[in-house]
Image (cartoon, grey):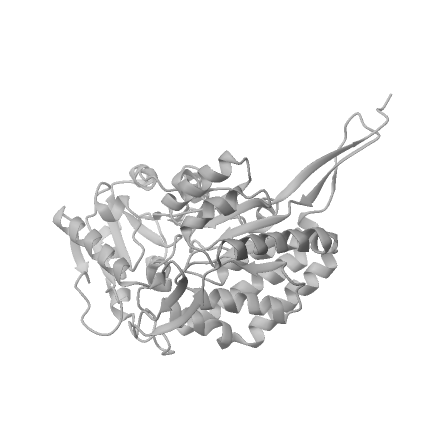
């Protein structure tokens, strides 16, 4: 599973059957891919108009939406995403392409500023060749979150996708080819982690985007920093969901928290992982979550009725059992799940742990699966303190009947985004990105498209008298 020294190979986490195998690029092939990306940028792509780029991005979106299952099934087969979720992800990826096709030019329009010049302005110019290092858990969405704004701003893109989802990467490139994108503007680079430092240091590469673990971010960020290259890091999270006693609709809060915790079998950086509940409603909210978790169906990810597919790999299942076992041993109360799954596929049971303390493993480590860690807070002040008591700072949510209070508390949560009475999600229209060990830089929205541009100030003389 993953990669050897010569190939990437994916294995179906439900059937354990081989899905796809692809030969890795050698050193010479890697150099050629970089050089081809540079030539495509210099000779063609940087001189295209926004209108031309938009037309091609819209064509990519149409290609994927018109052939939905062709692009969705590889996710289901390679990493176990339920087929309905996989279709939704393809549509969301298409939405990212469409969004930047429509708004990219406006986001990057020249800004005229007053100064002592006859005329002075700021223009946004592409950097050149960019590298996107991508994970397995949302293979299409996270690829397009990088690709759509980088392409619309005039950069060429090299996509180094995860070794566990090689077919997804191939299909993404196919979508661009079938949409009529010029050759080598978007390319798939099939290499292992050991090759990345050399690639990042290559003078052709002008910017790096990584979605992955905090450990990977530390490594990639250090290399990029030593080369003084812009880098965007979207890393792990341990998102808090704060449920205050004045929440008017606890049933809805429980619905959304449940959705946030089980979507993609819990394998999401921005999932609600630490459920912090104010004391007067603590036991009631535990019961509401338990009722909802018990109704969710684990099963074949190709089955239309399945809500929870398998975990992507067996070692991830083993890791989660260790996290749960250590937390129970430390005093957490097991409300639901936790047992070893007997049967076909790499499943982890829907699990609820109550009476979790901030120092327990499920609270201080990222849990990448359907585990809800519930923490009691005596009041809202303690809830905020608990929410911030983590090395992560990706997202968070607050549930309250007082919107003004919710907005005030949002400013006290040290995360890149906060949802009030709603789910934390990524949206092409809005910037997302973390603080602390959850990352640096922003993706999406008007802010994300400016991560890989030269924000160039132009002063035109003569000076005003």
Q: In which quarter of the image is residue 292?
A: bottom left
Q: Say if 267 sits above or below 414 in the image.
A: below
Q: Quadrant of residue 255?
A: bottom left
Residue 342, image x and y in percent? 18, 71
Q: Quadrant of residue 125?
A: top right
Residue 13, image x and y in percent? 31, 69
| Residue drawn at point x = 68 percent, y = 47 percent | 108
Residue 439, image x and y in percent? 44, 42
Q: In this view, does 2 lie to the left or right of 325?
A: right
Instruction: Please say whether residue 279 is visible from this viewpoint.
Output: no
Say which quadrant the N terminus sits in: bottom left
Q: In this view, does 76 lie to the left or right of 451?
A: left
Say which quadrant the C terminus sits in: top right
| Residue drawn at point x = 28 percent, y = 48 percent | 277
Instruction: Please say whether residue 378 is visible from this viewpoint.
Output: yes
Between 123 and 362, the residue placed more toward the observer is 123
Residue 6, image x and y in percent? 40, 61
| Residue drawn at point x = 56 percent, y = 73 percent | 65
Q: Which residue lies furthest to the front in this view?
A: 28
The total number of labels drawn is 0
Q: Residue furthest top?
A: 465
């Amino acid at each position: 599973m993953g990669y050897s020294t010569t190939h990437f190979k994916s294995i179906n986490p439900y059937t354990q059957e081989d899905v796809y195998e692809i030969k890795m690029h050698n050193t010479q092939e890697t150099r050629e891919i970089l050089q081809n990306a540079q030539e495509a940028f210099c000779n063609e792509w940087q001189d295209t108009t926004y209108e031309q780029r938009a037309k091609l991005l819209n064509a990519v979106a149409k290609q994927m939406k018109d052939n939905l299952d062709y692009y969705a099934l590889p996710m289901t087969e390679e990493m176990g995403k339920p087929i309905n979720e996989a279709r939704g992800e393809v549509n969301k990826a298409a939405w990212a392409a469409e969004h930047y096709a429509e708004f990219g030019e406006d986001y990057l329009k020249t800004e005229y500023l007053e100064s002592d010049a006859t005329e002075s302005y700021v223009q946004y110019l592409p950097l050149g060749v960019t590298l996107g290092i991508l994970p397995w858990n949302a293979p299409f969405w996270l690829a397009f979150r990088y690709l759509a704004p980088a392409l619309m701003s005039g950069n060429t893109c090299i996509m180094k996708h995860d070794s566990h989802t090689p077919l997804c990467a191939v299909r993404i490139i196919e979508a661009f080819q079938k949409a009529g994108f010029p050759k080598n503007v978007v390319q798939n680079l099939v290499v292992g982690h050991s090759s990345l430092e050399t690639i990042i240091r290559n003078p052709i590469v002008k910017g790096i985007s990584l979605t992955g673990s905090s450990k990977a971010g530390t490594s990639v960020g250090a290399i990029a920093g030593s080369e003084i290259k812009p880098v965007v890091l979207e890393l792990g999270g341990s998102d808090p969901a704060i449920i205050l006693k004045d929440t008017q609709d606890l049933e809805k809060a429980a619905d959304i928290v449940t959705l946030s915790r089980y979507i993609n079998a819990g394998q999401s950086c921005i999932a609600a992982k630490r459920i912090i509940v104010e004391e007067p409603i603590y036991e009631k909210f535990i019961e509401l979550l338990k009722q909802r978790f018990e109704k969710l169906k684990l099963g074949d990810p190709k089955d239309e009725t399945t809500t929870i597919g398998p975990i992507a790999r067996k070692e991830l299942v083993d890791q989660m059992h260790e996290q749960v076992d250590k937390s129970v041993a430390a005093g957490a109360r097991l409300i639901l799940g936790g047992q070893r799954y007997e049967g076909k596929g790499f499943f982890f049971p829907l699990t609820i742990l109550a009476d979790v303390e901030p120092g327990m493993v499920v609270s201080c480590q990222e849990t990448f699966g359907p585990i809800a860690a519930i923490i009691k807070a005596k009041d809202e002040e303690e809830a905020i303190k608990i929410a911030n008591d983590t090395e992560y700072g990706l997202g968070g949510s607050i549930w309250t009947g007082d919107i003004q209070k919710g907005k005030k508390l949002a400013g006290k949560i040290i995360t890149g985004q906060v949802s009030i009475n709603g789910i934390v999600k990524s949206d092409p229209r809005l910037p997302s990105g973390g603080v602390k060990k959850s990352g640096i830089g922003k993706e999406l929205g008007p802010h994300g498209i400016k991560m890989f541009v030269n924000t160039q100030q132009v002063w035109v003389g003569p000076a005003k008298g």
